[in-house]
Image: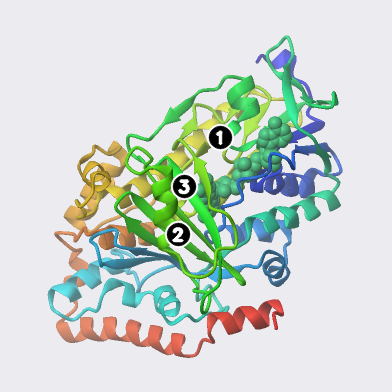
Amino acid sequence: MTPHTLTPVRRLVIAGGGTAGWMVAALISKVLGKQLDIRLVESDEIGIVGVGEATIPTLLSYHELMGIQEAEFMAATQATFKLGIHFEGWRNLGEDYFHGFGTTGKDHWTAGFQHFWLKGRERGLAEPYTNYSLEWSAAKAGRFAHLPKNGLNYAYHLDATRYGQYLRGLAEASGVQRIEGKIGEVELAASGDIAALKLGDGTRIEGDLFIDCTGFRSLLLGQALGVGYEDWSHWLPCDSAVAVQTASVGEPLPYTRSIAHPFGWQWRIPLQGRVGNGLVYDSRRLSDDAARSTLLAHIEGETLTTPRTLKFTPGQRHKTWHRNCVAIGLSSGFLEPLESTSIHLIQRSAIRLMQMFPAGGVRECDIEEFNRQSQNEIEHIRDFIILHYHVTNRRDAPLWQHCGSMDVPASLARRIELFRETGRVFHAANELFGENSWIQVMLGQGILPGAHHPTADLMGDVELGNFLGDIRAQVVRTVAQLPTHRAYVGSYCGVA
Ligand code: FAD
């Protein structure tokens, strides 16, 4: 696109009204609702994926930008609090670990807490690493409360369908016009840009900029503009999921469970009144029927829905912005929900688009920068997810044998080697997962560093024992003062 063809963007068309469509519509309309004509087309007949129910703490900042009141949002979406993910049987059968949000222990500026913990472990002074995490201790005890100064870092489990409806209310209040209908054709202009969407009833929706939120179909970017897909299934072999909702049994846990199976893994996401369950699997190694019966054999409580099978290819489009079309959500790519990152990626793309909003016309330099940032972001998350599969002692099934012996991206191999040899982890600006996330998962999956930082050697046994003991005692004292998660959610959201 050359500068003289710049067309100011006044008419924004969002294709699709799943979590992606409504998150984007709500955010853009909140800021630019008065300046833009924003229309969102969705088809009730096609519906939404609707299984994205576990989130990460970054969603709090989206809600802050949106001015969303937390208790109201939680009541509207049947949300509970989430302190992290409990990984069960990932390293070895029968062994668990926790990836909690927030920090573990106390860092020194020269060296992270893991170095002091490693030294303490060597001298028989340390408890398991997770015991120094407030989030894990609260999660294990089923307790939660808001604490000052980010005392407990959290995200939410939410009902995806209700969340979409909640955001739709906000977007419509900011002027977004919803159009019900099935997009039958994407009309291209002579320039190759998208000119309009044509609906089944003949309605023609013209726009200057189009956001493709049509889910796995990727109707605009993938199908109409022909932007190809980079397939990452050689690193992430799971290509299917089966999901079912069940009635709650017992108290809602303040964390997601991720339970490893021979052919994939199972999620368990507790909401206020029900539980979301699913099995992610490699369909070359487990048939869809067998996956369904495996899931049904491993759930608790009465089933509330018919099990639903979903197919996907892990990876991402070569470009997520091409010409006058930006793909956000499943239309742009997909990573399995092991670390609950898809809604985060939607949020990041929506914010990035706002920061680069091409009001004066679409420019190639914006497109390049947007695509570069999107690619870096998803590749970082991809590496983190591969880590869980690759660093494991499990060899009891072909999936684990393959993952344990496969080559991994060089960026991940470097990180693993650095941690294995030195205990060090570095986190680049704009990377989603911080040092403590990497440390928890690398230790949890079975990497024990061969060395620690010399700062930890400066402490004698008594000093180190007191240092570790004080942190643990503070964690225990804090957790003992917390109410149960269920009681807290009930009073916070006004649930009887
Ligand atoms: P969809 O929900 O598929 O929405 C597509 C929209 O496009 C719909 O409104 C549909 O009607 C419309 N549409 C499509 N074609 C047409 C047409 N021809 N005409 C008109 N409208 C059309 N994310 C997380 O963050 N956490 C999780 O725990 C999590 N778990 C997941 C588990 C699984 C198995 C899967 C597959 C995904 C999971 N995700 C998770 C991802 C999450 O579900 C999605 O990122 C999120 O739902 C966004 O989906 P979407 O809006 O892009 O697509």
Q: Quadrant of ligand 1?
A: top right
Q: Quadrant of residue 438?
A: bottom left
Q: Please say if 489 is above or below 323.
A: below
Residue that protrudes farthest toward the top in the picture: 190
* x then y, percent, for residue 312: 48, 38
Side (left or right) of 207 relative to 358: right
* Mark 3 Cβ and ligand 1 under 8 Å apart: yes
Element assignment for label 3: strand
The amino acid type of the residue labelled 2 equals Leu
Element assignment for label 2: helix
Q: Please say if 454 is above or below 44.
A: below
Q: Please say if 271 is above or below 264.
A: below
Residue underneath mark 1: 332
Q: Quadrant of the N terminus?
A: top right
Residue underneath mark 3: 241
The residue closer to the viewer here, 331 or 285, is: 285
The residue depicted at 33 percent of the width and 64 percent of the height is 88
**Distance of label 1 from label 2 (alpha carbons):** 31 Å
The residue depicted at 49 percent of the width and 81 percent of the height is 143
The residue closer to the viewer here, 328 or 61, is: 328
Q: Dots 3 and 2: beta carbons under 8 Å? A: no
The residue depicted at 21 percent of the width and 45 percent of the height is 401
The amino acid type of the residue labelled 1 equals Ser
* x then y, percent, for residue 449: 18, 59
